[in-house]
């Protein structure tokens, strides 16, 4: 039986992938700060789900993550879903610092521990580390500076570890999942965003990217086109087309 640990499984994308994987017969270790939603998934799939409360910004996060791996008797895949995202044109320090702590430092704590786990276990089957980054990491977004930069950080970090794994002959692959807008609590029920996907649309694409071992997956094909167009815009023009903070409060 394949085993996946999902960090950030108490709502949104992580919660949906956790229930899907459990339904597909995987053993699933789930974590986040809120216990109630984790307990609810455990009650739905008592035989193949274990949970632990983990705050990825706390120094004991990596230790608690390794304990969770033991609870499900090993790990084939880590999926890091924990994340926060806010528009912050006023550059409120608490928002920006928290974004960096959860999306960057928190991810480093968990992903480093997963990398070292795969390095130490010498799995016959290839391990996999997957992170939900975002297309927001493609360019710096003025009204969501810390969010877009944190998503770029995640993408670059996976690139770096992919190279390190090759150098060190560690049997692990990396999947960088880059969605556009998905209707989750992260968007606060705000429906005015363009090309917003439902979880029914996005989750199967994310799951396929993980199980097929894709290196990078932009979710979905429409957002792949947007991503390509964004890359083509020269810096001087990108500077002038910034989103209007009055029109929107969230970012993918
Ligand atoms: N929804 C979108 O449009 C979209 C688009 C592109 C990328 N993404 C990315 O997808 C990921 C998941 O987002 P989502 O849309 O599913 O949002 P969500 O429903 O708000 O879920 C966020 C998850 O992160 C967890 N989390 C937040 N702070 C944490 C902390 N300190 N320690 C541990 N876990 C923490 C939350 O659990 P607790 O609060 O219980 O701790 C929750 O399970 C994020 O990285 C987001 O940036 C989302």
Image (cartoon, rainbow, N blue to C red):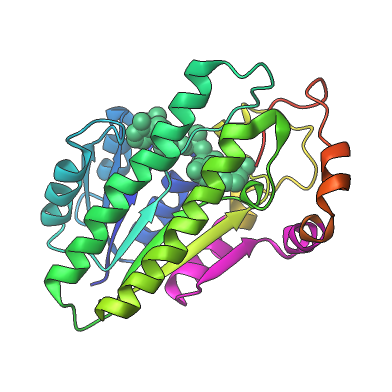
Is residue 223 rendered to the left or right of residue 20? right
Picture coordinates of residue 119, whole percent (x, y): 19, 70
Q: How many marks?
A: 0
Query: Is residue 150 visible in the rendered structure shown here?
Result: yes
Q: Between residues 190 and 217, which one lies in front from this camera angle? A: 217
Q: Position of residue 144 (x, y in %)?
A: 65, 32
Which residue is drawn at the image coordinates 71% and 29% (left, top)? 143
The part of the chain drawn in magenta is: 203-229
x and y percent of residue 38 in the render? 30, 37
Q: Quadrant of residue 248?
A: top right
Instruction: Identify the residue at image location x=18%, y=63%.
Output: 117
The foreground one among 157 and 58 is: 157
Residue shown at 60%/53% (left/top)? 200
Q: Is residue 244 left or right of residue 99?
A: right
Specify whether residue 217 is painted magenta. yes
Q: Horizontally, is 34 left or right of 91 in the view? A: left
């Amino acid at each position: 039986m394949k085993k996946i640990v999902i960090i950030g499984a108490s709502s949104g994308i992580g919660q949906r992938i956790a229930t899907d994987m459990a339904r597909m017969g995987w053993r699933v270790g789930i974590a986040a700060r809120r216990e109630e939603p984790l307990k609810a998934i455990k009650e739905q799939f008592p035989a193949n789900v274990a949970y632990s409360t983990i705050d990825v910004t706390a120094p004991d996060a990596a230790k608690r993550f390794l304990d969770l791996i033991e609870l499900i008797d090993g790990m084939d895949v880590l999926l890091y879903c924990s994340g926060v995202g806010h528009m912050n044109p006023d550059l409120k320090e608490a928002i920006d610092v928290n974004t960096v702590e959860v999306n960057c430092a928190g991810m480093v704590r968990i992903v480093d521990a997963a990398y070292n786990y795969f390095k130490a276990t010498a799995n016959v089957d290839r391990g996999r580390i997957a992170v939900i980054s975002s297309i927001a990491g493609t360019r710096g977004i003025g009204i969501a500076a810390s969010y877009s930069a944190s998503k770029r950080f995640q993408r670059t970090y996976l690139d770096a570890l992919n190279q390190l794994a090759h150098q060190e002959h560690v049997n692990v692959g990396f999947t960088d999942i880059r969605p556009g807008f998905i209707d989750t609590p992260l968007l606060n029920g705000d429906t005015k965003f363009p090309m917003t996907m439902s979880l029914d649309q996005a989750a199967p694409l994310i799951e396929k990217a993980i199980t097929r071992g894709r290196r990078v997956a932009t979710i979905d094909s429409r957002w792949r086109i947007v991503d390509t167009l964004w890359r083509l815009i020269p810096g001087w023009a990108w500077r002038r087309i910034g989103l209007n903070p009055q029109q929107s409060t969230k970012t993918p």
